Amino acid sequence: IAGITQAPTSQILAAGRRMTLRCTQDMRHNAMYWYRQDLGLGLRLIHYSNTAGTTGKGEVPDGYSVSRANTDDFPLTLASAVPSQTSVYFCASSWTSGGDLINEQFFGPGTRLTVL
Amino acid sequence: QQQVKQSPQSLIVQKGGISIINCAYENTAFDYFPWYQQFPGKGPALLIAIRPDVSEKKEGRFTISFNKSAKQFSLHIMDSQPGDSATYFCAASLSLVGNQFYFGTGTSLTVIP
């Protein structure tokens, strides 16, 4: 069972370039999330999707876009990367209805992105 | 505005000691409070979680203490081991509004042998 896979593992990108981070889950979770992790700031939600075909903005959505064409995939796109988007990006997934354990979010291994 | 405030930023504990990490929140509508553990180079993984209708939850050496009136909750790691060395994040969520988590800033725990 793979859980959540992310690609690439790491990337160095020139400012102004377009970049898509890929995320795939095999748990059939209805909800998926993108976070960025920065030292001293913790994990901050960028965008989320509660079901295929719908997306929503999190705490720090500016400069990022997402799509959710199907249940399994949730790509994150930086249309024109800037140095402040240098971060570690985590994709996560979960169920969003029902009892206690269903709230657990499962995280991928992360993508380390450096924008120069 | 940080919805969940976490302290300390870093913590060094001797093997066998007790590690305590504290979190505070503002929104009284939060109804789910998980703690995540993250090892270097890995994604966070759920460690333990609590609902606000109980004051304490214990799983092995890990305990969450929850004080609803003070809007605070804490993680206690008993008999801390070097393998517990990791970054710990508290979080809070509103389960009725999807499943959006608000994370604390993290605590880097080092357990010295």
Image (cartoon, rainbow, N blue to C red):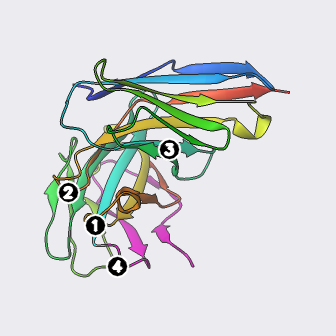
> Whole-percent x and y of residue A82?
29, 43
Three-letter amino acid code of the residue under disc 3 = Tyr
Residue A42 versus residue A50 in the image, above or below = above
Q: How many marks?
A: 4
Secondary structure beneath disc 1? strand
In the rendered structure, are the residues bearing label 3 and label 4 in contact, judged by CB atoms less than 8 Å apart?
A: no
Q: Residue at x 47, y 67 (%)?
A: A7
State which region is magenta: A1-29
User: In the rendered structure, are the residues bearing label 1 and label 2 in contact, judged by CB atoms less than 8 Å apart?
Assistant: yes
Respond whether the residues carrying marks 2 and 4 are from the same subunit: no
Name the image quarter holding residue A90.
Answer: bottom left
Does label 2 lie on the same chain as label 3?
A: yes
Look at label 2 and name its amino acid.
Answer: Gly
Identify the residue under disc 4.
A72
What residue sits right under mark 1 in the picture? A31
Which residue is tagged 3? B36
Q: Is residue A107 left or right of residue A1?
A: left
The location of residue A2, given as percent across then percent down, is: 55, 76
Of all residues, the one furthest to the front in this rendering is B54
For residue B51, side relative to residue B7 (left or right): left
Instruction: Give a yes or no on whether discs 3 and 4 share a subunit.
Output: no
Image location of residue B23, percent across then percent down: 41, 25
**Mark with earlier residue (3, 2):** 3
- Residue A33 image position (x, y, % from top left): 31, 58
Packing grade of label 3 (10 A; few <14, some 14-19, many >=20) is many
Does the magenta segment cover residue A24?
A: yes
Residue B98: image tag: 2
**Whole-number angstrom distance, CA of label 2 to CA of label 4:** 18 Å
Distance between mark 1 and mark 4 Cα atoms = 10 Å
